[in-house]
Amino acid sequence: MFKKFNLVLLIPLLFALLASHRLWRPGYFSMQDDMHVFRLSQFHQCLLDRQIPCRLISDGGLGYSYPLFNFYSPLPYAVAESFHLVGFSLIDSLKISFIIPFFVGSVGMYLLSFTFFGPVGGLISSVLYTFAPYHALDSFVRGALAEHWAINLLPLILYSLYRKKSNLFILSLTALLLSHNLTLVYFLPVLFVFSLIHKNILYLIKNSLYSFLMASFFILPAFLEKNLTTVSTMTQGYFNYIIHFATLYQLFVSRFWGYGASLWGPIDDLSLQVGYLHWILPLIALIFAIRSPSKKTIFTFFSIGLFSLFLTHNRSTFIWQMFYFMPYYQFPWRFLGLAIFCFSFISGIVTKSKFLLVIIIALTVGLNINYFKEDIWYPNLTDSQKLTTEEVYRQSGAGLKDYWPKYSTEFPTTMAPSQPQVLNGEIYASDFFKNSNIASGSINITSEKATINLPIVYFPTWQLTVNGYPSEYQVNPSTGQMQLTLPQGSHQYKLEFLNTPIRTFANVLSLIGLLLFIIKLYREAKS
């Protein structure tokens, strides 16, 4: 039985390989969120600068320093960085980080559905989930790496919770916490409901504590320090959710596929479809659920999936207006991720026939395989070509307003100068150096005093020393840049980026969580 199970498990691996096969070639592909190479290079620089965990990136925000990883999910980049450290290029490391979730999601969904519906059901759910059009949209169209990771972790989390594989549950939930905040928010209620149905709520709480502790270094600052940024701009203009509802035709009928933008009304230049089999088979599953011992689970997940689809439609506007956090989803069709998860899972009950299984696999792959391809492939693209001056300017400025420090009244439009700027006085400046967490330089002031503008936007908190002694700086109210006003003479100054009390507390919690988890592993191995 165990050997047979292992052999069957090869099939979900083949599904994942087929869905991701175009990423195994040399080169890179076009995507909407085309800033990952720059961000990974900055994540790598953080490690070189020994800023661990990475929070501030030196060349972000058009070179003014930017607290990206204080708020943006680090796990996909940490995975990519692990491959970059052993010799893979930035581009290849990122492609690997795009590929891995396909395998995690395909195998995880098989394991979850197998537990409830057997091997045939497991394969049905696995092929549906792997080849859901929304997965292709996330990976090959949007390039939404963080969300791609998050929604592919969901099956593994429920499987490990149901089977009480505590270590796998802790690790997979921790991975979700470090992957995508918005997916986390809509999945936690699902996790709670699933635990209520299967009467393991105490088990959920006990093991979730490990995950929340280990992920605290990211979760706590991301939520508690967002008021230090202009994060509210993420819900304005083009990113106002009211523009991006899907129509019933787009969800259930349309086979259109595009690589453009989400637009007002039904004229989107990308696909918002559920997938034909992805909504037909769940309806059939309801019939089989009536006499199934898992009927409570099936009806619950069908209801959650249906409610998720409702949230993608403008009839749900009153719900979006009811909860303050909903506008941060920006695109209501993001709830397709939860819908395809629920529908793929419960579809595992529709048959135990191997003949029908083959037909379902053939139809699912045949209907959707052409979505799993890029718009443009660049076969000879290199890291250096993605990090030219023009490319750094484009990628560094993309999404600049999302987490821009709130200490300015204007946003930059050009790259930061490479040297401090003299505001008044007569000085000679030299040896200016800046990385992700340190800035230093020398200045010789010949006038009575002088003021310089540093090419760094203030974000809590920086510590200044001048000639080895603690000193004070000012923050320009217009640009948010840090300013130094010093008297006549020669001065050596140094700025160091330090943790706030919240970040320090969060880091300590993560270390405690990691230590407790290691002790848990040790005790289990010993017993």
Image: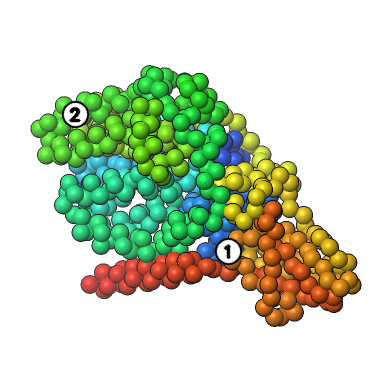
Task: Please tell me which residue is depicted at 69% across the width and 65% down the height of the picture.
Answer: 474
Q: Earlier in the sequence, mark 2 or mark 1?
A: 2
Residue furthest out toward the left: 291
Q: Please, what secondary structure does the residue beneath circle 1 have?
A: loop
Q: Residues within 10 Å of mark 1 (few under 14, many from 20)?
A: some
Return the x and y of residue 233 as percentages of the image width and height.
Answer: 55, 43
Return the x and y of residue 313 as percentages of the image width and height.
Answer: 38, 27
What amino acid type is highlighted by mark number 1? Answer: Pro
User: Which of 309 and 7 lies nearest the eye of the viewer?
Assistant: 309
Residue 388 visible in the current orientation: no
Q: Which mark is residue 377?
A: none
Q: Please, what secondary structure does the residue beneath circle 2 have?
A: helix
Query: Which image quadrant is residue 375 in?
Result: top right
Look at mark 1 in the image and give the residue it sits on: 460
- Compared across the picture, whether 299 is left or right of 230 comes to left
Colour scheme in the image?
rainbow
From this view, report whether residue 445 is shown above or below residue 108: below
